[in-house]
Image (spheres, grey):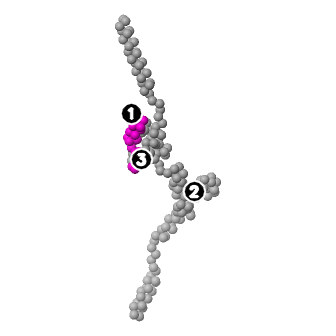
Amino acid sequence: MGKTKGKTQRRMKRVRGARKAKKSQKLKPIKIAALILSAIHDLSESKGSTPNKISGYISYASNLPEHQIKRQVNTALKRGVEYGVLRRYRGHYFLPTGDELDRANRIALRFARLPSSVPSKLLSNLSESTATVIESAVDVNPSLSHQSTNPLANKKSKRAQSVPVSPSPSNISSNKDESLIDSDEE
């Protein structure tokens, strides 16, 4: 009986030792989003960075195995695109160009191009900063100022302009007679 008791105690010691070793290997959580942004910035590829290149760069810089980081990198990239921190095109990830003010102005331009369904009385109640953004958008692109809210009015005027003006038959005959008279005088 003593022999079996000693074997189980040895096994328990090994298991306890293995558990302690695993606890010491456990890493503190990494702020993966900051690492991803710095990796994309440092790689600075013209076509953007792929998730494999990003995870490889992070694993090289932080001395962590790549297989531990891949899943975190992929989820962080998806969230970055979702929140607008990153841009994605054909599987490549970019940092958005420009600062937040430029981005806000671009969005304001897009909204200014849309036909307005809000009466002008409500536009006067907007905050000053919103009003200046809208005014600057109209200053940049004069076609953004709408003369009429009726879309049919604009279409009619475009159609009338596109139809070629044909001369009246009376003008044609008088022009021919004048040309005949001029040729006879010579």
Residue topped by disc 3: 44
Q: What residue type is labelled 1?
A: Pro
Binning the other alpha carbons within 10 Å of mark 2 as few (below 14), some (14 to 19) or many (20 upward) gives many
Residue 75 drawn at (x, y percent): 44, 38
Element marked by disc 2: helix
Q: Residue at x 45, y 71 (%)?
A: 163
Distance in Å between CA atoms under marks 3 and 2: 34 Å
Q: In which quarter of the image is residue 18?
A: top left
Q: Distance between the residues labelled 1 and 2?
A: 50 Å
Describe residue 145's horizontal placement relative to residue 42 as left or right.
right
Compare residues 44 and 141 and report the one nearer the observer: 44
The extreme left residue here reads 3
Please tell me which of labels 1 and 3 falls first in the chain: 3
- Numbered label attached to residue 134: 2
**114 w.r.t. 92: above or below:** below
Residue at 40% x, 48% y is 45
Please name whichever residue, 179 or 57, is drawn nearer the observer in this view of the structure. 57
Q: Which amino acid does label 3 sit on?
A: Ser
| Range covered by the magenta-colored residues | 43-62
